Image (tube, helix red, strand yellow):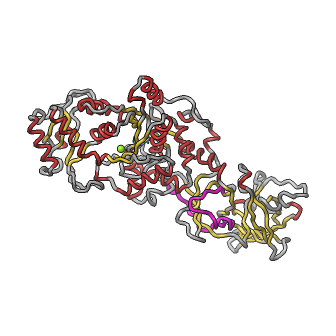
Amino acid sequence: MKTEATDNLGEEKKSKNFIEEKIDADLKEGKNEGKVHTRFPPEPNGFLHIGHSKSICLNFGIAESYNGKCNLRFDDTNPANESDEYVQSIKRDIQWLGFEWEDREYYASDYFEKLYQYAVALIKKGKAYIDDQTVEEISNSRGTPTRPGKESPYRNRSIDENLDLFEKMRDGEFDEGSKVLRAKIDMNSPNMHMRDPALYRIKKISHHRTGGKWCIYPMYDFAHCLSDSIEGITHSLCTLEFEVHRPLYDWILSQLGVFHSQQIEFARLNLNYTVLSKRRLLRLVEEKYVEGWDDPRLHTISGLRRRGYTPKAIIHFAKRVGVAKRDGVIDVALLEHSIREDLNKVAQRRICVLDPLKVVITNYPEGEEETLLAINNPEDESAGKREISFSKEIWIEKNDFMEDAPKKFFRLAPGKEVRLKYAYIIKCEEVIKDEDGEVIELRCTYDPQTKSGVDTSGKKVKGTLHWVSAKSAKKATVRLYDRLFNIENPTGDKEKDFTEFINPESLKLISNALVEPALLEAKPLEKFQFERLGYFCLDPDSKDENLIFNRTVTLRDSWAKKN
Ligand code: ATP
Ligand code: MG
């Protein structure tokens, strides 16, 4: 698959993207007195997701590379779905990603009074009017892209009447839906957004910051451009769906003669096998398909954090995806590749047996225990070694044994030999079964000459297994995550609800795994590679001996294979 992302894979990008080219041109012309000021403008109506991280990296990244500033601005103009809980989660996530807004934390709601005054100014210029039509009437008279709209019978109200009605709207004298403030532009415009768009509507809902002070709230299109202008934003970067809104953005700023920020659009990040829109994420949370906004199966920032992702991997991924002018879908395998690449270098290796099968080493002395050395990270010598213990009884992975093994099965089978990692070569001598015929134990012998690092036997075996010593192993719960949806584009079928494509096996809970005791010291969210099994992190809900690990990704890199 050829995507924007594969073009500059693996290396820091060198060429400039179209936004940087535009900024360079502006700087050359001496625009904005040589300043670059961006903003990241989330609406606090849900948690941030991986798509937002692209916008965060872009806005904060551009500010940084041009020695400019980036504001954090909450676009909180729609009180119905917004809350302080979301504000806090957004701040936490941006900080975790490593970006700083210093003292520049702004809220569109802080500008409500100013925005109101701007609306009054538009009315005074004869550029806005109060419409008494119902929402339905307005929508019906809008026309279609090929059929012109019809002017409202209220369009030519006098300025004084409009001013009076607008004030009464603010004072709560009218019911919700009974009136709106509309811009007076052009009902014949080929751009539907220019056909007298609504600027203010009545909503008798309390706001999470302004409480009951307001009962009219500005529309996004009115609030956004003016908030940008108030903050002196030079380049207002947003996603492509706002391209058709740009003429309105420019119209409002020009009519009011205020500082003119420039809107530039880029392609939104889409990922396969998942959903990103907050509306859909909210449904997954509310309808309990997942356990919360930070469920490790979601591509929210908090979900990815709990899954074991690092800020570095997410930022690297965002860079690889790059900034494009056309929408595309990125393969989630690229995101998984990014975290493997990071964790391979930094995660210490540990041993965990997910599905234990007992092995008794018959010729090993009863009661004896010996200490062996295991390498913490073969990619990083400075990570050193740790001690693991070996004794007469150990556990191996059930699927590392097969009674009737085919020729190519290089693990354990009757009469066959394998190496136990960091320890000895063992040979399977006897298979013990329960009354149902299920294998419950293996009797093996070990060869004392084959100790790892000091092997004098000259023996060669093809398979190496991971194992834990029965005496010292600790129990652990392990959550194996898989993709939340079993098709690439769960929202592509308009006839079906996306929840129909949820993968019923997206979470496999293993409650009786065994891990080496060194893992008792793991800290919340600390990451490990469990040898042969994948990357895991300690879930923050773990307590003392109740270890819970989340699998971040397996070791198999389908991205690296394909590319
Ligand atoms: P969603 O559609 O997921 O609910 P949104 O656009 O409504 O997202 P906002 O809180 O308004 O969410 O977004 C804040 C900023 O992040 C906006 O500038 C928006 O353009 C950008 N953004 C949102 N989703 C993506 C995405 N998938 N890729 C890139 N940027 C995004
Ligand atoms: Mg939005």
Residue extending furthest toward the top: 29
Q: Position of residue 396 (x, y in %)?
A: 72, 64
| Residue 222 part of the magenta-drawn span | no
**Residue 163 in view here:** yes
Q: Quadrant of ligand 1?
A: top left
Is residue 401 shown to the viewer in this render?
no
Q: Which corner quadrant holds the C terminus?
A: top right
Residue 395: x and y, percent?
72, 67
Note whether 527 is above or below 120 in the view shown.
below
What segment carries the magenta color? 503-529
Going by the image, does 176 lie left or right of 23? left
Q: Residue furthest bottom?
A: 367
* Residue drawn at x 23%, y 40% as measured from the top left: 199
Residue 409: which quarter of the image?
Answer: bottom right
From what the image shows, is residue 64 above or below residue 303? above
Task: Report whether 248 appears left or right of 563.
Answer: left
